[in-house]
Amino acid sequence: QARTDWNNKDEYPITSNWEMLQGNASHNGFQPVILDETNFSFRWNESFAYNPAGVATGEGKVFVVAANSNSELIALNALDGNEDWRYAFGGLSSSSTPSFSYGKVFMHSGGHEVTALWAINADAGNLIFRSAPGGQWSSYSAPAVFENSVFMSVWYYGCMLVMSVDGETIL
């Protein structure tokens, strides 16, 4: 069991990144720590002019999908809240909560001709791959990443699409 006695330099909590919706591929939000909320304080605060689609964390960053006119993925420095980079997808009809794993940020988009799985380099903010469209006008949940695979639901006719984290279709 992880410990949270901040006064003892030999004890520290062991947590994982909040990589996707509900924290992990099981979507259960479990972190193996017990935290004392009296030791918490604000480090930084960010306000958005739009409704963020959700967040994921990894590599010292907080990833936010902005449901604005450019449909942007924004990487904020987890320590100070400053913007590290921004990737504009360009007018998407819908976008999912981001997921982080294997040094990539994954996001689903929906709409006519823009339905895709996107993979963005978490460090630099450049496009790694965009999957071929496979459906339209759906609302997608965050991609679930597990064992080198990315799982996405509600493709055509309520099916599931599985891709490798490198963009190759598996199922």
Image: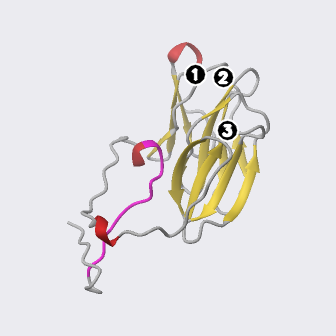
Measured Cα–Cα span from mark 3 to mark 1:
21 Å
Q: Picture quarter containing residue 114? A: top right
Q: SS of the residue at dot 1?
A: loop
Give residue 40's quadrant in the image: bottom left
Magenta stretch: includes residue 12: yes
The location of residue 21, given as percent across then percent down, is: 46, 42
Say whether residue 53 is visible: yes
* Residue 115 rendering spot, x and y as whole percentages: 68, 27
Q: Residues within 10 Å of mark 2 (few under 14, many from 20)?
A: some
Q: Amino acid at mark 2?
A: Gly
Q: Earlier in the sequence, mark 3 or mark 1?
A: 3
Give the colour scheme of this rendering.
Answer: secondary structure
Quarter of the figure that contains the N terminus: bottom left
Residue farthest to the top, as pictured: 157
User: What amino acid is labelled 1 in the image?
Assistant: Trp
- Distance from disc 3 to disc 2, alpha carbons, whole Å, reads 21 Å
Residue depicted at 27% across the width and 65% down the height: 35
Q: Which residue is mark 1?
A: 155
Q: In this rendering, would 40 be left or right of 122? A: left
Is the residue under label 2 in contact with that under label 3 (CB below 8 Å)?
no
Q: Which residues are magenta?
A: 11-21
Q: Which residue is identified by label 3?
A: 67
The vertical placement of 34 against 110, above or below, is: below
